[in-house]
Image (cartoon, rainbow, N blue to C red):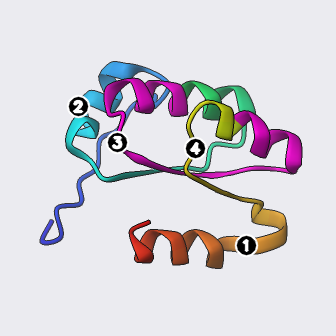
Amino acid sequence: GARGVGAVYGDPTQAEVLRAAGLADAKMIVVTNPSLMEKLRICGAARAINPRIAIVATAAGDAERAWLQEVGATFTCDPLDEASDALLRAIHAGL
């Protein structure tokens, strides 16, 4: 699109899907999968493909937040507490 935003359909836990989505050159990825294990795999793969990428992820509570930060999440928010406003602020601020 006009802002350089694209879309790729596939399993984001697979590194080849993230590469096809252009993650190597991306500035940010937003991870909102409901499963913690999927979020951890996505964050780990994203960080391996692009060590500089900002990772914004939803975390259901302090334990998930700690796990996500351990695998490289730059910013986390609890969607039940902070809803989508916190995600949108982080995305618009460009970290």
Q: Which residue is mark 2?
A: 20
- Residue 66 colored in magenta in the image: yes
Q: Position of residue 71 (x, y in %)?
A: 60, 30
Check contact, mark 4 vs mark 3: CB within 8 A: no
- Residue 59 colored in magenta in the image: yes
Q: Which residues are drawn in magenta?
A: 42-67
- The first of marks 4 and 2 along the sequence is 2
Label 4 secondary element: loop
Q: Position of residue 21 (x, y in %)?
A: 26, 39
Label 3 secondary element: loop
- The first of marks 3 and 1 along the sequence is 3
Q: Which residue is mark 4?
A: 73
Check contact, mark 2 vs mark 3: CB within 8 A: no
- Residue 39's place in the image compared with 45, above or below, is below
Label 2 secondary element: helix
> Of the residues tagged 3 and 1, which is closer to the observer?
3
Marker disc for residue 83: 1
Q: Nearer the viewer, residue 88 or 34?
A: 88
Three-letter code, disc 3: Arg
